[in-house]
Image (spheres, grey):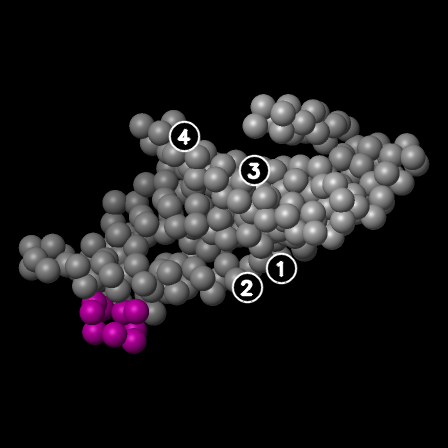
Amino acid sequence: MIYHLGKYILLMLQVFRKPEKGKVFRKQLFIEFQNLGVDSIGIVAIISVFMGAVVAIQTAYNIDSPLIPLTMVGFTTRQSIILEFSPTIISLILAGKVGSRIASEIGTMRVTEQIDALEIMGINPANYLILPKITAAMLINPIIIILSMGFGLFGGWLVSIVTNLFTSQTYIEGLQSWFDGYSVFYALIKTVFFAFIITSVSGYQGYDTKGGALEVGRASTKAVVWSSILIILFNLILTQLLLS
């Protein structure tokens, strides 16, 4: 653990140097916006809609007392999606989709000696390959999470349309009740940290790959596992710091 932590820190020191060519960095940044962000919107939308619907149904079924208004369905759905589901669960899903892609891409370049070729050409490969990914993810992931929140709340509203558990009006009233803008700010802060974890850890696992195709697969698996573990750990730490 100490060995890999030291190598990770040294790699990050190389990553966060000023890019040698700003034009090349900006071009690569927009490519990563597409690869890491836009390509993930589809799966995020589908999962968010269905999870919002499930949360709304489960909340409605568990309201047994007539003293509890049905507006609590909208309130509970909103809080669950904004505080935990969208920033944390979606980040775990992105760790599997984006993290494995980054690790396999950089790992393949390592085992095929493309990274060695960049070093011979006098290019800082860590900065060239990893920094655009980290920057792009930290900028676009909050946008994806905001979209996820919207899709999740929309999924809960669909339940009011297709079932008789509660009405659309009571659901919308619940969404508007006791809203605190800080909860959205808290979710986006977590998202930025999680984006950095996913891209930096996955980049490290790919950059540290040795061997052949089999090791690339192992690096991809390690990237997903370690990113997920660190997301859960920092979720606890950030929740304690930001909500206590």
Q: Give the magenta part as a residue range.
A: 159-167
* Category of crowding for the residue at label 3, using alpha-carbon neighbours closer than 10 angstroms: few (below 14), some (14–19), many (at least 20): many
Is 236 situated above or below 48? above
Toward the viewer: 62 or 135? Answer: 62
Q: Which amino acid does label 1 sit on?
A: Asp
Report helix, strand or loop for mark 4: helix
Whole-number angstrom distance, CA of label 2 to CA of label 1: 7 Å
Q: Where is residue 142 in the image (x, y as percent from the top left)?
A: 52, 45
Is 131 situated above or below 109? above
Residue on which disc 1 sits: 39
Q: As drawn, which residue projects farthest toward the right?
A: 121
Q: Is residue 220 left or right of residue 186?
A: right
Labels 2, 4: front one: 4
The residue depicted at 7 percent of the width and 55 percent of the height is: 67
Whole-number angstrom distance, CA of label 1 to CA of label 3: 19 Å
Q: Which amino acid does label 3 sit on?
A: Ile
Report helix, strand or loop for mark 3: helix
The residue depicted at 76 percent of the width and 35 percent of the height is: 126
Labels 4, 1: front one: 4
* Category of crowding for the residue at label 4, using alpha-carbon neighbours closer than 10 angstroms: few (below 14), some (14–19), many (at least 20): few
What is the number of the mark on residue 197? 3
* Category of crowding for the residue at label 1, using alpha-carbon neighbours closer than 10 angstroms: few (below 14), some (14–19), many (at least 20): some
Q: In this view, does 23 lie to the left or right of 88?
A: right
The tag earlier along the polypeptide, 2 or 4, is 2
* Category of crowding for the residue at label 2, using alpha-carbon neighbours closer than 10 angstroms: few (below 14), some (14–19), many (at least 20): few
